[in-house]
């Protein structure tokens, strides 16, 4: 049985006035264009085409909302770092993204990073945007199936060294299912509590795949 059997698309948002009521809990999914964000959403939600995937980067131009359960939402953000998106269109996103950050219902950010490239400065800038001092930030190091075990271990070590206390990180592959259960557990935990303290339990389940920050206060 699916971990999130009732997940469904609910709306696309192009302007702050279209955002749903600021109640319940939501987690934003973001990542550099072509990092595998849509594939990650589909794998975690166990749906083949819930979020649209494309070989052409930069296809997500709106905030796309999916309901996990009543009052619990996933938000798919536009990819960043795609040069061919016109500057005027990127400027339209800014007020919308800032409005999202101001919402009390935003409990956390899942950041998808291509594991072959590792965490970069623009990823850290997005983590800072999410205000990790008040929200959970969890990094999915995607496409890890394209790395051997030694490379995976090094990626995880290097990523957590760079992230420090700002975020937790795990290995992930939508292609072969590596880390999908841990990501599902993390998403459920954040939607339920929004606490970084929920993550150490995942460390015990996947000690070779997951590195978390120190537990926060209850």
Image: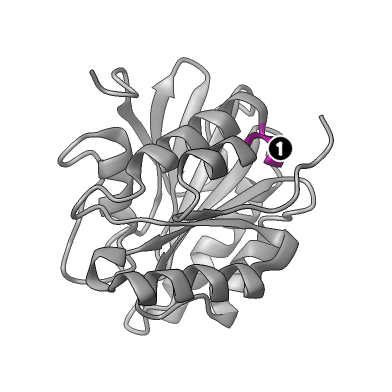
Q: Residue 7 at x, y = what percent?
A: 32, 25
| Nearer to the camera, 212 or 108 | 212
| Quadrant that contains the N terminus | top left
Judged left or right of residue 208, residue 4 is left
Q: Residue furthest right?
A: 217
* Residue nearest the observer in this picture, 123 or 197: 197
Is residue 125 something one can see in this rendering? no
Q: Which residue lies furthest to the bottom in this view?
A: 83
Give the answer, above or below, for where 143 lies relative to 174.
below
Q: 123 left or right of 133?
A: left
Residue at left offset 50%, top offset 24%: 72
**Percent coordinates x, y for residue 151 in the rendering:** 37, 77
Does 65 sit above or below residue 7?
below
Residues 210 and 51: in front is 210
Residue 88 image position (x, y, % from top left): 46, 76
Residue that extends furthest to the top in the rendered view of this protein? 70
Identify the residue at horizontal 54%, vertical 40% (top origin): 204
Q: Is residue 5 magenta?
A: no
**Residue 144 visible to the viewer:** yes
- The correct choice, above or below, for 208 with respect to 9 in the image is below
Q: What SS does tag 1 mark?
A: helix
Which image quarter is the C terminus in? top right
Left or right placement of residue 45 versus residue 184 in this view: left
Left or right of 100, for residue 151: left
Q: Where is residue 13 in the image (x, y as percent from the top left)?
A: 43, 43
Residue corresponding to mark 1: 197
The residue stretch that appears in magenta = 194-199
Count of marks placed on residues: 1
Crowding at label 1, few (<14), some or many (≥20) Cα neighbours within 10 Å? some
Residue at 40% x, 25% y is: 68
- Identify the residue at image location x=34%, y=68%: 35
């Amino acid at each position: 049985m699916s971990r999130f059997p009732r997940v469904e698309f609910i709306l696309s948002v192009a302007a702050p006035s279209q955002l749903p009521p600021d109640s319940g809990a939501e987690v934003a999914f973001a990542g550099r264009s072509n990092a595998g964000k849509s594939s990650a959403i589909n794998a975690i939600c166990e749906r083949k085409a819930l979020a649209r995937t494309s070989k052409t980067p930069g296809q997500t131009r709106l905030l796309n909302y999916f309901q996990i359960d009543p009052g619990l939402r996933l938000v798919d953000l536009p990819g960043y770092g795609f040069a061919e998106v016109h500057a005027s269109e990127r400027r339209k996103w800014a007020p919308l993204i800032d409005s999202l950050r101001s919402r009390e219902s935003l409990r956390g950010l899942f950041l998808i990073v291509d594991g072959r490239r590792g965490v970069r400065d623009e990823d850290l800038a997005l983590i800072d945007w999410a205000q990790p001092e008040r929200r959970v930030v969890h990094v999915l190091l995607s496409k890890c199936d394209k790395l051997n075990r030694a490379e995976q271990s090094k990626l995880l070590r290097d990523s957590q060294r760079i992230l420090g206390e700002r975020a937790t990180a795990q290995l992930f592959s939508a292609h072969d299912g590596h880390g999908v259960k841990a990501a599902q557990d993390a998403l459920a935990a954040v939607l339920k509590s929004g606490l970084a303290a929920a993550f150490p339990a995942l460390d015990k389940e996947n000690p070779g795949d997951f590195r978390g920050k120190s537990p926060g206060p209850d």
